[in-house]
Image (cartoon, rainbow, N blue to C red):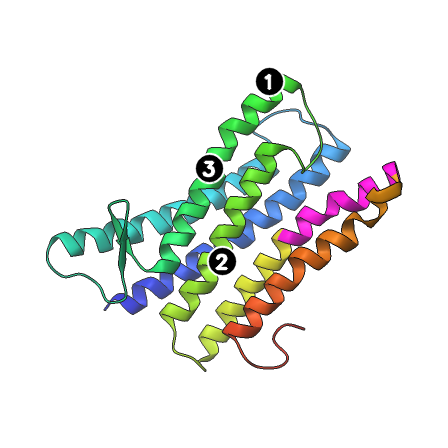
Amino acid sequence: MEAPRRRAALWGMLAAKLWGGWGVTWDIQWHLLIGRDSFWIPPHLMTYSGVAVGAAVALVTLARETWLTLKGRRPPASVRCLGLVGTRGMHLAWWGILITILAAPIDDLWHRLFGLDVTLWSPPHLLGLLGSQVNSAGCLLLATEAYPAGSRARSAAVLLGGALFFGGFHLLLGTSVLWAYEQGGLAFFYYAILGALFLPMTLLAVARLEPARWTPAL
């Protein structure tokens, strides 16, 4: 009985991540072209609505499985962490998105103390991105928990989750390209160094979870 609910939660979080990811990309372009005019700009609303939906889906799923455990009907393949019961993938997804949520007030405080900056490499932005990547890893793990090996649904979930995982690191590396041409010197090699460090991580994860040869390339 729990498998359909976990699958619905997985696809709900993947859809929310895709929606929020588009919002982040739009937000970067908005700040570059227009500036930081208000919190209530459309890309902010798009981004934070995606975060809110993802957090709600993960928390409701964990809360339900915790309630079932208290009733003596513990769902299969679940573990307890800080009082909440759920699969390992769901825990990773929840705690990752919680990190992203905590990064929002820190980001607001950062701008109040140090002014408005248009860079992804500020501490609160990196914290939010870290949470998003932990959430993406949780979605990948949840795909293997929710579907049997070899199923098309599992392949689709792993591909979409892997693409979002890859996209998070790609977004992080974008700033290194700007620094390469602004600063030169060692900064010129930032993208090559950081890309070699982070990007294969996502390709290896997808290749291990979905063994078809074409998966990492796609």
Does residue 182 lie above or below 67 as drawn?
A: above
| Quadrant for the N terminus in the image | bottom left
Disc 2 is placed on an element classified as helix
Asked if one can make out residue 9 in the rendered structure from this viewpoint, the answer is no
- The disc labelled 2 sits on which kind of residue? Ala
Does residue 135 lie above or below 104 as drawn?
A: below
Magenta segment: does it hold 121?
no
Q: Which residue is mark 3?
A: 101
Does residue 148 lie above or below 103 as drawn?
A: below
C-alpha span from label 3 to label 1: 18 Å
Mark sitting earlier along the chain (2/3): 3
Tally of marks = 3
Mark sitting earlier along the chain (3/1): 3
Magenta span: 169-183
Q: Nearer the viewer, residue 57 or 190?
A: 190
Mark sitting earlier along the chain (2/1): 1
Q: Main secondary structure of the magenta part?
A: helix
Q: Residues within 10 Å of mark 3 (few under 14, many from 20)?
A: some
Asked if one can make out residue 12 in the rendered structure from this viewpoint, the answer is yes
Apparent side of residue 145 relative to residue 202 in the rendered image (left or right): left
Q: Which residue is mark 2?
A: 137
